[in-house]
Image: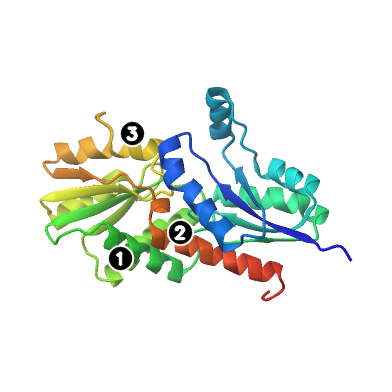
Amino acid sequence: MKEKKAAVLAVSFGTSYEDTRRKTLDVIEKEMQEAYPDWPLYRAWTSGMVRKKIKERDGIEIPGVGQALEMMKRDGISRIAVQPTHMMNGFEYWKLYGEISDMREQFDRISVGKPLLTDLTDCDQVLQELVKEIPAAEDEALVLMGHGSLHYANFVYAALNYRLRELGYQNVHIGTVEAWPSLESVSACVRAQNPKKVILAPFLIVAGDHATNDLAGEEEDSWRSYFLAEGYQVECVLRGLGEYTGIRRILLEHLREAVDELNGEQK
């Protein structure tokens, strides 16, 4: 009987910033491959805009989820463990899930791993990893910039802020660049704390456009410029979450769960 070939599909939003991609997505995928060395690893990005930019600028074609699945089918892959690097169960995650559902019957089995922030354990581990990696003194505020979404899953940011207080981190605040909590919401919390210094860092897998421009840019509407105008000392830490070993460990654990499900070890 012919053995059914299994493979891992790593799915990310994508980035046009090569430097941060090498430090984050490439490392995440490398560690996934090392965890399952006998399984081929395929890549897919869900952002059509980013994929188009990479193709036009660099001549490199990165597949979307459907394209990657077609490629795996041609390669004789019949069992797939899909692991997203997305932050939460938002639009991008459900978009990839929909594409997988459309082609699920063309494979023997497909399991889909959880995004980074799925349950309370994930949230606690992520928060504790960040306060360890980016320590802030009592007279400093650590402000983390997330992307934000119009999807209902965006409420994870409010839950994270609440959880930070429960864990005793009164000087750590999370906002978003495109949703709520907004910069104004976060700045109100910072003012109430009255720190001498604000440390800004991306709450994003990659430190790409939002981190470079919206967070740390020289423009008047950047978060850096905003807090400088408020009279604080400002330090920017431009490291994507994918650069932290502990964060990558969570994604690897989610992949392990997806592989176990694929192998019938859990439902």
- Mark closest to the chain's N terminus, 3 or 1: 1
Mark 3 = which residue? 213
Left or right of 120? Residue 37 is right
Q: Residue at x 67, y 58 (%)?
A: 39
As drawn, the label of residue 248 is 2
Q: Position of residue 227 (x, y in %)?
A: 19, 41
Residue located 15% across and 55% down the image: 140
The x, y position of residue 104, in whole percent, is: 77, 55
Nearer to us: label 2 or label 1? 2
**Disc 3 marks which amino acid?**
Asn
Q: Which residue is mark 1?
A: 164
Residue 160 vs residue 194: left or right? right
Mark 2–mark 1 CB contact (< 8 Å): no
- Quadrant housing the C terminus: bottom right
Q: Amino acid at mark 2?
A: Arg
Give the distance between the C-alpha atoms of the residues marked 3 and 1, in whole angstroms. 26 Å
Mark 3 Cα-neighbour bin, 10 Å: few <14, some 14–19, many ≥20: some
User: Foreground: 91 or 130?
Assistant: 130
Type of amino acid under label 1: Leu
Closer to the eye: label 3 or 1 = 3
Mark 2 vs mark 1: which is more N-terminal? 1
In the depicted structure, whether residue 214 falls above or below residue 79 = above
Measured Cα–Cα span from mark 2 to mark 1: 21 Å
Spot the residue most to the right.
Answer: 1
Q: Earlier in the sequence, mark 2 or mark 3?
A: 3
Which residue is painted at 16% across and 38% down in the image? 228
Q: Position of residue 255 (x, y in %)?
A: 58, 63
| Residue 152 in view, yes or no | no
199 to the left or right of 259: left
Q: Can see residue 19?
A: yes
Residue at 54% over, 56% down = 89
Mark 2 and mark 3: Cα distance apart in space: 25 Å
